[in-house]
Image (spheres, rainbow, N blue to C red):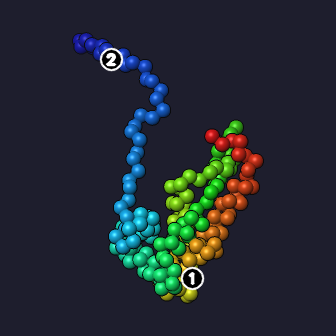
Amino acid sequence: MEVKQEVQVPLLPPQVNTPMRAKRVTKKILAPDPVHGNRLVTRLVNRVMQRGKKSTAEKITYKALDIVKAKGEDPIKIFETAVANVGPKMEVRPRRVGGASYQVPSEVRGDRRISLALRWIVQYAQKRSSKEYKGYAEKLAAELTDAAAGAGESIKKRDTVHRMAEANRAFAHFKW
């Protein structure tokens, strides 16, 4: 007959309920692009990039900025103005309160504002008609100039987001 030995598990101290167990994630600082020396252009290149083809994305982006320059305007100034114009100031975020979901308006902070602006500019540049523009660089250049002028699909998207936030202002008191 076998005698089973009872293994004693050492008692652990009670878990302290800490809000964060892991280290804070540090944001990676992107290197400025080699041509213009601008970090925002690097972010645009990364947003244009598909399937890891960065050199192709750089060619497209720089060609688009050259097209803007050929029109007699400063490409970096136009690009920064476009990003500033397209970036939303308010957006709605879903919040569950008592079994119901409310669209609660909240302010969009700096980095997310730039990310959304770049995403929308690239998205609506891709959607432009291929009959009207020869290549993707032309589409991107047209979207950038339109956005800088306060027109274009990306500006319409920003206005839609702002209208949603304005319409749901009654739920602003649910903000956390």
Q: Residue at x 37, y 64 (%)?
A: 32
Label 1, residues with CA under 10 Å away: few <14, some 14-19, many ≥20: few
Tell me the amino acid under the disc marked 1: Ser
Residue 131 lies left or right of residue 46; in this view the side is right
Q: Report x, y in % for residue 103.
A: 68, 50
Q: Residue at x 51, y 72 (%)?
A: 77
Query: Is residue 43 depicted above or below 59 in this figure?
Result: above
Q: Report x, y in % for residue 106.
A: 64, 49
Q: Report x, y in % for residue 154.
A: 60, 69
Q: Residue at x 67, y 48 (%)?
A: 104
Residue projecting furthest to the left: 1
Tell me the amino acid under the disc marked 2: Val
Query: Is residue 123 depicted above or below 97 in this figure?
Result: below
Of helix, strand and loop, which one carries label 1? loop
Residue under numbered circle 2: 9
Instruction: Please state, as top left, top right, bottom left or bottom right, where the C terminus lies in the image.
Output: top right
Residue under numbered circle 1: 129
Q: Can you tell which mark lies on residue 26?
A: none
